[in-house]
């Protein structure tokens, strides 16, 4: 049977064209989405009996359910990117509810296992590896390499800074428009999160890096590099020979994804695995999401000293992740055993009074670093 991924790729364009055609025929947006949903279901589930509650939940693995969900998310992004009025509408195609419930149950079970049997990481070594990787990636102008190394020193989502990834609400990341480096608070930046969900616009917030102050200029250079449309829009290749030759490479997008072989070679070249002391059965792949979890764990272990107001619950970690205070999703990130050496000379603080940006924009939430 054809894989979910291949079936999705073969159907996404068909769905978009069907939506356009149905609209020109006078159908409402809701009617168009219902028809597109049926086209997509038929492609993703050739045997429609699989959609019946209880019929398919048992055979599917978490990996398969995650893949299905990701394809539904991608389809919604495809539709909303060209039809902004659809953003957040509840009639957009979505994975059948019983499969969503099964995915949530299996995800929670995996989180519980990871917490009971955590991967042990040499945090100081991992941060130094990421710093060295940033230097190499910036020197050779390899966007994907800089992006993954950056995720191990700043708590960002994979495409938070990628200019080639248009938000579902139409925004494109841009320096001094959606993202700002805050000179008044070294090691701190402001950002518009890439996550936009269910019609909700997530507010801008400030975030921080966990490296020593001596590396702040490097982090700023990487921050500006990732947001540079010039670098992001350079040719993106997917071949191993090009990577091994250290050719310049632009940002990844739906039109250019690095092959598994290239990503594997990059992880090996940078040396991330050498900082893992004991995987303890974990199969978590080294990705930007892994880096995001790692940074969250380091913040939780107070790699930077908290001001007193932050020393309650998971307040600091919620903030660096961009989660609501008390979010249940935060627990899933705190799954690694790390004991980082505390960075000296700075303290981590939360915003009480709005931070005013260079263009007059106010930021009312997040964290910032202050030298002591």
Image (cartoon, rainbow, N blue to C red):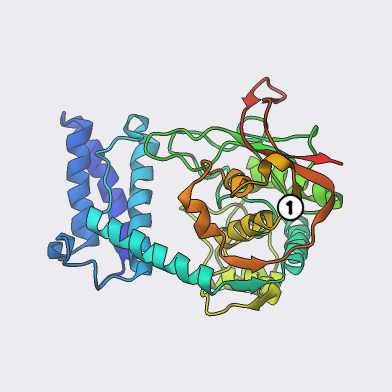
Residue 224 at what x, y percent from top left? Answer: 71, 42
Residue 301 at what x, y percent from top left? Answer: 69, 58
Q: Nearer the viewer, residue 254 or 80?
A: 80
Q: Dot 1: few (<14), some (14–19), or many (≥20) neighbours within 10 Å?
A: many
Query: Looking at the figure, which quarter contains the N terminus?
Result: bottom left
Residue 234 at what x, y percent from top left? Answer: 62, 50
Callout 1: SS:
loop
Question: How many marks do you count on the picture?
Answer: 1
Q: Residue at x 24, y 53 (%)?
A: 97
Residue 250 at what x, y percent from top left? Answer: 62, 53
Above or below residue 119? Residue 331 is: above
Q: Residue at x 58, y 38 (%)?
A: 173
Q: What residue is pinned by disc 1?
A: 210
Query: Looking at the figure, which quarter contains the C terminus?
Result: top right
Above or below residue 165? Residue 355 is: above
Q: Residue at x 72, y 66 (%)?
A: 339
Q: Nearer the viewer, residue 95 or 142?
A: 95
Q: Quadrant of residue 153?
A: bottom right
Does the image show residue 96?
A: no
Does the image show residue 264?
A: yes
Given the current orientation, which residue lies at the most extreme top position? 360
Relative to 246, 253 lies left or right? left
Q: Nearer the viewer, residue 27 or 53?
A: 53
């Amino acid at each position: 049977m054809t894989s979910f991924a291949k079936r999705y790729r073969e159907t996404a364009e068909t769905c978009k064209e069907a939506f356009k055609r149905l609209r020109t025929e006078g159908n409402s947006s809701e009617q168009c989405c219902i028809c597109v949903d049926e086209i997509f279901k038929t492609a993703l589930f050739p045997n429609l009996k699989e959609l019946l509650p209880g019929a398919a939940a048992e055979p599917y693995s978490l990996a398969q359910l995650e893949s299905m969900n990701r394809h539904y998310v991608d389809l919604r992004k495809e539709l909303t990117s060209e039809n902004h009025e659809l953003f957040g509408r509840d009639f957009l195609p979505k994975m059948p509810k019983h499969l969503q419930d099964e995915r949530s149950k299996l995800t929670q079970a995996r989180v519980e296992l990871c917490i009971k049997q955590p991967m042990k990481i040499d945090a100081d070594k991992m941060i130094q590896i990421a710093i060295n990787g940033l230097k190499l990636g910036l020197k050779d102008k390899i966007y994907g390499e800089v992006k993954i190394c950056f995720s191990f020193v700043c708590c960002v989502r994979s495409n938070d800074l990628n200019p080639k990834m248009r938000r579902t609400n139409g925004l494109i990341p841009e320096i001094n428009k959606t993202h700002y480096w805050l000179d008044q608070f070294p090691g701190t930046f402001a950002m518009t999160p890439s996550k936009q969900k269910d019609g909700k616009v997530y507010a801008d917030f400030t975030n921080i890096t966990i490296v020593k102050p001596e590396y702040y200029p490097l982090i700023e250079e990487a921050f500006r590099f990732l947001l540079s449309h010039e670098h992001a829009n350079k040719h993106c290749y997917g071949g191993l020979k090009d990577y091994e030759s250290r050719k310049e490479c632009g940002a990844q997008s739906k039109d250019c994804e690095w092959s598994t072989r290239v990503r594997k070679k990059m992880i090996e070249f940078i040396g991330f695995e050498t900082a893992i002391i004991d995987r303890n059965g974990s199969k978590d792949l080294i990705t930007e999401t892994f880096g995001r979890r790692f940074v969250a764990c380091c913040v939780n272990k107070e790699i930077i000293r908290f001001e007193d107001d932050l020393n309650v619950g998971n307040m600091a970690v919620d903030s660096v992740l961009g989660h609501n205070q008390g979010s249940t999703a935060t627990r899933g990130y705190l799954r690694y055993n790390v004991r980082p050496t505390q960075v000296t000379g700075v303290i981590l603080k939360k915003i009480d009074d709005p931070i005013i940006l260079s263009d007059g924009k106010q930021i009312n939430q997040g964290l910032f670093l202050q030298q002591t």
